[in-house]
C-alpha cells in the first residue's frame, strides 16, 4: 500500500509543471511574456529575451518609481550589475548586467522602467527631416516653385555674414535684401556667428556642400534684422523694434513679410 502511494506521488510530481525559475531559460521566458514586466521594459530588451539571448550582457537605464534607495541599489548590485553610473539631479541609473537580470529588475514595484542604452544618431539635415526635400520633389519630379522664390524671410538674430555665397541666388545676386541693426553697435554682420547659421538653415542655397546642407527655402530673400550684439545678447525692446518697425523708408514692404518677422522673433529670441 505504501509503495503504491509513493509511486502515485512520484508520478504526480513528474507530471506537474515545474516553477519557471527551476527550468533552464524558463525565468527569462516568463519575464518576456509577462504583461507586468513587458510594460516596464523596452521592446528591444523584451525581443532580446525572446530570441534566447538572456545571458547577453547589456547596458541598461533603470528608472525608479521615485528615489533610488539603498534597497534598490543593493538588488541591482546583487543582480551582478557593474559599471554603475548615476547622474546629478536625475534619478535613473545606468548599469551593465545580463538581459535576464535586467528583465527581472523590471518586475520590481520600485522600478518604473528598464530600457537598453540605444544608439543615437542624426536623422539628416533640416531640409530632409522637415519634409522640405519631399515637397520639392513631390510626384517624383522636381518642383522648383517650392524653393522660396518670391518669399521674404526675416531673421531676428545676431546678424548675417552677407558675403557668404550660400546667400546668392541663381544669378549670383545677394538675397539678403535688407540689413538693419537694433543693438546700437552700428553693424549688421555676424561677429557672434549664430544668425548666419540660422539664416542658412532657413534659406541657404547649399552650394558649399553639393546641396547636402541646403536650406528650407534656398531661393527666398532674407531680411537681416540684428537684435543680438557681439556677445549674443539683446533686449526685448530691440526685438519688438525689429518685429514692429515704425513707418519709414526702411519699413518692411508687405504684411506677409511682417508676419514672418514676428514668427522669426518668437523662434530666435
Image (cartoon, grey):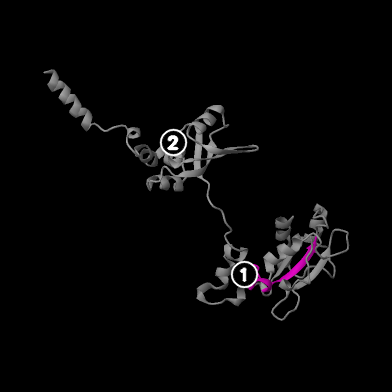
State the image quarter where residue 174 is shown. Answer: bottom right
Classed neighbour count for the residue bearing mark 2: other residues with Cα under 10 Å, few (<14), some (14–19), many (≥20):
many
User: Which residue is found at the position 62% from the left and 69% from the top?
Assistant: 212
Farthest residue in the top direction?
2
Say if the magenta span includes residue 247: no
User: Which residue is found at the position 76% from the left and 68% from the top?
Assistant: 223
State the image quarter where residue 130 is shown. Answer: bottom right
| Above or below: residue 259 compared with residue 93 | below
| Above or below: residue 82 compared with residue 150 | above
User: Which residue is found at the position 17% from the left and 22% from the top?
Assistant: 6
| Image position, residue 160 (x, y; %) | 78, 66
| Number of the label disc, if any, that sits on residue 104 | 2
The N terminus lies in which quarter of the figure?
top left
Image position of 121 (left or right of 202): left
Provide the residue designation for mark 1.
Answer: 212
| Image position, residue 184 (x, y; %) | 88, 59
Determine the CA span between mark 2 and mark 1: 46 Å
State the image quarter where residue 218 is shown. Answer: bottom right
Residue placed most toward the observer, 139 or 254: 139
| Image position, residue 13 (x, y; %) | 22, 28
Circles 2 and 1: CB distance less than 8 Å? no
> Does label 2 or label 1 sit earlier along the sequence?
2
Q: Find the magenta span and give its range.
A: 207-226
Image position of 52 (left or right of 136): left
The C terminus lies in which quarter of the figure?
bottom right
Q: Is residue 219 visible?
A: no
Classed neighbour count for the residue bearing mark 1: other residues with Cα under 10 Å, few (<14), some (14–19), many (≥20):
some
Image position of 262 (left or right of 20): right
| Above or below: residue 148 compared with residue 103 | below
Amino acid at each position: 500500500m505504501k509503495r503504491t502511494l509513493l509511486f502515485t506521488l512520484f508520478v504526480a510530481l513528474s507530471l506537474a509543471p515545474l516553477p519557471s525559475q527551476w527550468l533552464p531559460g524558463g525565468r527569462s521566458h516568463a519575464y518576456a511574456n509577462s504583461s507586468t514586466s513587458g510594460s516596464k521594459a523596452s521592446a528591444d530588451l523584451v525581443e532580446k529575451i525572446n530570441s534566447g539571448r538572456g545571458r547577453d550582457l547589456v547596458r541598461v537605464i533603470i528608472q525608479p518609481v521615485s528615489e533610488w534607495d539603498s534597497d534598490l541599489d543593493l538588488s541591482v548590485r546583487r543582480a551582478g550589475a557593474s559599471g554603475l553610473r548615476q547622474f546629478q539631479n536625475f534619478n535613473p541609473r545606468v548599469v551593465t548586467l545580463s538581459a535576464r537580470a535586467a528583465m527581472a529588475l523590471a518586475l520590481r514595484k520600485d522600478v518604473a522602467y528598464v530600457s537598453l542604452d540605444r544608439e543615437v544618431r542624426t536623422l539628416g539635415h533640416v531640409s530632409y527631416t522637415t519634409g522640405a526635400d519631399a515637397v520639392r520633389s513631390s510626384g517624383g519630379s522636381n518642383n522648383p516653385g517650392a524653393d522660396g522664390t518670391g518669399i521674404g524671410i526675416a531673421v531676428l538674430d545676431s546678424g548675417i555674414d552677407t558675403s557668404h555665397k550660400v546667400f546668392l541666388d541663381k544669378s549670383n545676386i545677394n538675397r539678403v535684401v535688407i540689413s538693419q541693426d537694433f543693438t546700437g553697435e552700428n553693424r549688421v554682420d555676424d561677429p557672434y556667428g549664430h544668425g548666419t547659421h540660422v539664416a542658412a538653415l532657413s534659406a541657404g542655397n547649399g552650394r558649399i556642400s553639393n546641396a547636402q546642407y541646403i536650406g528650407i527655402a534656398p531661393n527666398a530673400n532674407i531680411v537681416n534684422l540684428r537684435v543680438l550684439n557681439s556677445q549674443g545678447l539683446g533686449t526685448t525692446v530691440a526685438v519688438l523694434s525689429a518685429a514692429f518697425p515704425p513707418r519709414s523708408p526702411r519699413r518692411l514692404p508687405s504684411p506677409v513679410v511682417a508676419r514672418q518677422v514676428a514668427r522669426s522673433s518668437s523662434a530666435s529670441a
